[in-house]
Image (spheres, rainbow, N blue to C red):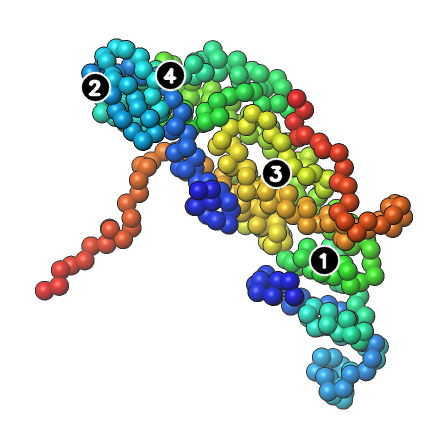
Amino acid sequence: MAQYYNIDDIIMEEEIILVVFQVAANGVGLLDPSAETNSVEQGSKVELPFWLAQELHLRQAVAMNVLACFNQKNRCPYFYELGCKIAPLVGDRTIGSFLLYTFSSRYKEVLSKAHSAAFAVAPKFLTLLTKEETHLYEAARSSMAAFKKWRTGGPRFERASILGIKRKPAN
Amino acid sequence: MAGQSDPHLSLFSAAEVEFLAEDETLEIVPNMKMDALNFICGDYGPFYPQITIEVPLWLAVALKKRGKCTIRPPQWMSVEKLTQVLEAERDSPREFQPLPFHYVEISRLLFDHARDDIPDMYMVRSLIEDIRNVRFHKVETGLETISARTHAVKLKNLSAMEVNIVRPFVVRTLQAFYKHDSPQMIQHPDRMANRQPQVADRGPRRDLRRR
């Protein structure tokens, strides 16, 4: 609940987690697409959003798997934040150092691309970055662009755009 | 004042850095006679023709625009000095040469307004560009060595505009590394002798630049 109003947090908690139900749950059959009755049996694998999975985990109703989104193939944009949330819950101690290692190696790539002004590279590369890395990249890129713009010179004072609007006098 | 342009990036805009640079003093040679100017920031003495006087850059540019003076380029802005600096920059891959803090801004302002007062203008301009590129490249190389154990990054002799460019990136990088390296994330049960609930020691202080 630390980031209740943070929009990134909210979107991030929507990520799907694979859980295994430890107890049978009645009345929530729609969570499990393969359930015949309106209930979820014990030991069935269900996909839940993270916020639900977390609450149920605290109530010892489910057991969370180290998730599919952590492998190399499908990398969600909230990779890091999700990992931070998961780490205290799951009994897997290596997540933290894995995240750190991933970040530091990706960071080098981000750095080399960030400050250079090659605009053609940008679109393909950006889709592979998580939110955090995009943040970093944008910061470097925008400050570099601002500097270049300043360097080419130009008038110190800019005319406010609203002054340029000419209105015909009403007849 | 910092961050007025964009509060999220905590960045001075380039124009703001230039504004700060205009407080640097340099010498002019007026070509008219004028009484002393009294400003809040100080008094700039009576101006006599052909007598050199030291004024801040903003005043020098204003007088130059009105055709009332000629600007003497600062000492460090000669071709010999700059060539020396460029050679030294290229020779030492980890250190920055001492340069005036606002050299980028001062040089740009002088090129824009006092073009005829600088001897060998094109040479000086290309030298300064080269120096800037070499230094920035060094900054980037140095930043690659930031790893999880870094508390702070020390870059000696970096100029105002260069600092301004890398500031948001470096700040966010350090924040991200800090977030990932907090002790509840990384637990080494076999390596740590006793578990400390406080922040663990993050290693000795390492400067990014050796002296």
Asked if the residues shown at circle 3 and circle 4 are in contact, with their CB atoms under 8 angstroms apart, the answer is: no
Residue at which label 4 appears: B73
Instruction: Give me the chain letter of mark 4.
Output: B
Horizontally, residue A5 falls left or right of residue A19, namely left
Residue A161 image point, x, y percent: 29, 50
The answer to whether residue B196 is above or below residue B83 is below
The answer to whether residue A167 is above or below residue B140 is below
Say how many tags the image has: 4
Q: CA distance from mark 1 to mark 4?
A: 56 Å
Nearer to us of marks 3 and 2 is 2
Nearer to us of marks 2 and 4 is 2
The answer to whether residue A170 is above or below residue B151 is below
Q: CA distance from mark 2 to mark 4?
A: 22 Å
Residue at far bottom of view: A37
Nearer to us of marks 1 and 3 is 1
**The disc label shown at residue B34, or none:** 2
Q: Are marks 1 and 3 on the same chain?
A: yes
Residue at which label 3 appears: A112
**The disc label shown at residue A83, or none:** 1
Residue B125 image point, x, y percent: 42, 21
Q: Quadrant of the C terminus of chain B?
A: top right
Horizontally, residue A104 falls left or right of residue A43, namely left
Asked if the residues shown at circle 2 and circle 4 are in contact, with their CB atoms under 8 angstroms apart, the answer is: no
The amino acid type, in three-letter code, at marker 1 is: Gly
Q: CA distance from mark 3 to mark 4?
A: 36 Å
Residue at (48% x, 49% y) in the render: B7
